Amino acid sequence: MEEMYIPMSETYVVSNEKDVVGFVSMMDNYLAALFIDVKHQGEGYGKGLLDFIKKQRENIQLKVYKRNKKAVDFYLKNGFVIKEETLDEQTSEEEFLMEWEKG
């Protein structure tokens, strides 16, 4: 992730008074990574980063593993829709291609 996506992406970091809490990395309109430290999940940081990116884009696409129900539900709750189901060739995991469009 670090070697492949970060150098080619636009990355934004969120922190509290003490620590880096998470980051989002975009490659054009593709959400390549959205990570929040496990200690801070559920505190609104992920939604905040997503809302920040939504203000800058007309549409956003991402892929998420189908079995990652927590992430799928998070994106559905935040206006994304499932466009198709595919198979990640590197991991053989079923995944969803999801998309958000500015309303």
Image (cartoon, grey):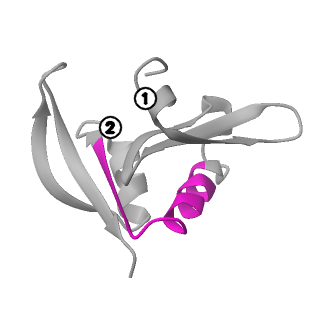
Q: Which badge, 2 or 1, comes first in the chain's sequence? A: 1
**In the rendered view, would you say 51 is above or below 38?**
below
Is 17 inside the magenta-drawn segment? no
List the residue tagged with mark 1: 5
Going by the numbered disc 1, the residue's amino acid type is Tyr
List the residue tagged with mark 2: 68
**Secondary-structure class at tag 2:** loop
Contact (Cβ within 8 Å) of mark 2 with mark 1? no
Q: In which quadrant will I find the N terminus?
A: top left
Name which residue lies at 80% across and 31% down.
Answer: 19
Write down the region rendered in magenta. 46-63
Name which residue lies at 38% across and 82% down.
Answer: 103
Q: Quadrant of residue 67?
A: top left
Q: Is residue 54 left or right of residue 81?
A: right
Residue 79 coordinates in the image, percent (x, y): 38, 68
Q: Pick the residue in front: 24 or 8.
A: 8
Disc 2 from disc 1: Cα separation: 21 Å
